[in-house]
Image: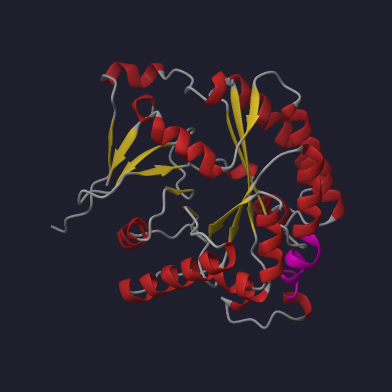
Amino acid sequence: MQNYPVVSRSLRQDGEARFRRPRPPWPGGARCVILLTIDFDGPSHDVGQGFTPLGARSTGRYSARRGVPRHLDMLDRLGVKASFFVPGYDAECNPEAVREIIARGHEVGAHGYLHERTLFPPEEEERRLTLTHDILTDLMGRPPVGWRSPSGQKTYTTLRVLSGLGYRYDCSDKDFDAPYMLDIGDGRQPFVEVANNTFSLDDHPWYHYSMTPVSEVEEAWRREFDAIYADQGYFLLSVHPRCGWGSGTPSRTAAMESVLSYALSHEGVVALTCAELAEWVRANSEHFEEVRI
């Protein structure tokens, strides 16, 4: 019989307490944290699939030319800092856009090299993770501390390499509605998993699969916030500054701004970057669950 790896949740509370989950202690005693995560996803998304980023496949080029500047201006108006996850190839193609993100005080994390959609042998995966890490470090003048899988793929090699490169958190897993500690074993420093669990709080499925009108997406996101605000208070929105299935165009960016303004108008709401929240969780780890893999 084949042996499969075991992923186990080790709680610091007794088993009964698992079903009485209190609201996590958020920074400053906040009732709800908001995280805006922006996946750059420029031409890397198309080149990684073997397409030339021209014609119908040119929508990724919109990210650096219009989407990112529009999102940055929106964030300035709101006074909110975001976490941008940038593929290494896009950073090479658009270094000025990455520098502008940093200059405006936002976080930049890693997001693959060519927005990889398949798994690679361990040596190739390590090469690509290290390549993007070096590209972003050179641009920023400091290493990134966060990573998000470009297509949901993650392996034990991923975690080992990221740990060796000094990463502090991952923002890929879908298995919880709050951040938690991720023990990867071998005596390595634990990660923080900034869980990215809400499929309906991602613009891609709305605009790509269901082709939902922007007004309906805006209303759905408001309702998602209302439910989350009443529950655990962990609202993580994932968007892409592309056109096509992204949120880089004027009406879709306006919808984002409307939703974020609505959320920020509520009492006890704080907006954080993923890195800021990860450091809070690490410093207060006794209040958060831990998963061992």
Residue 88 x/y as whole percent: 55, 70
Residue 67 x/y as whole percent: 77, 59
Task: Report the magenta stretch's main SS.
Answer: helix
Image quadrant in which you'd find residue 54 = bottom right
Residue 265 x/y as whole percent: 76, 24
Judged from this view, the residue extending furthest toward the front is: 141
Taking the spot 68% from the left edge, 25% from the top edge, the residue there is 226
User: Is residue 218 covered in magenta?
Assistant: no
Q: Is 293 on the left-hand or right-hand side of 43?
A: left
Give the colour scheme shown: secondary structure
Eyeballing the image, is 96 above or below 6?
A: below
| Camera sees residue 63 | yes
| Camera sees residue 219 | no
Eyeballing the image, is 252 above or below 111?
A: above
Taking the spot 48% from the left edge, 50% from the top edge, the residue there is 172
State the extent of the magenta-drawn residues as a range: 58-67
Judged from this view, the residue extending furthest toward the right is: 250
Taking the spot 21% from the left edge, 54% from the top edge, the residue there is 4
Image quadrant in which you'd find residue 30 = top right
Q: Is 198 on the left-hand or right-hand side of 204?
A: left
User: Is residue 60 covered in magenta?
Assistant: yes
Q: In the image shown, does 282 or 212 lie closer to the viewer? A: 282
Q: Is 270 on the left-hand or right-hand side of 241?
A: left
Say which quadrant the N terminus sits in: bottom left
Residue 33 x/y as whole percent: 59, 30
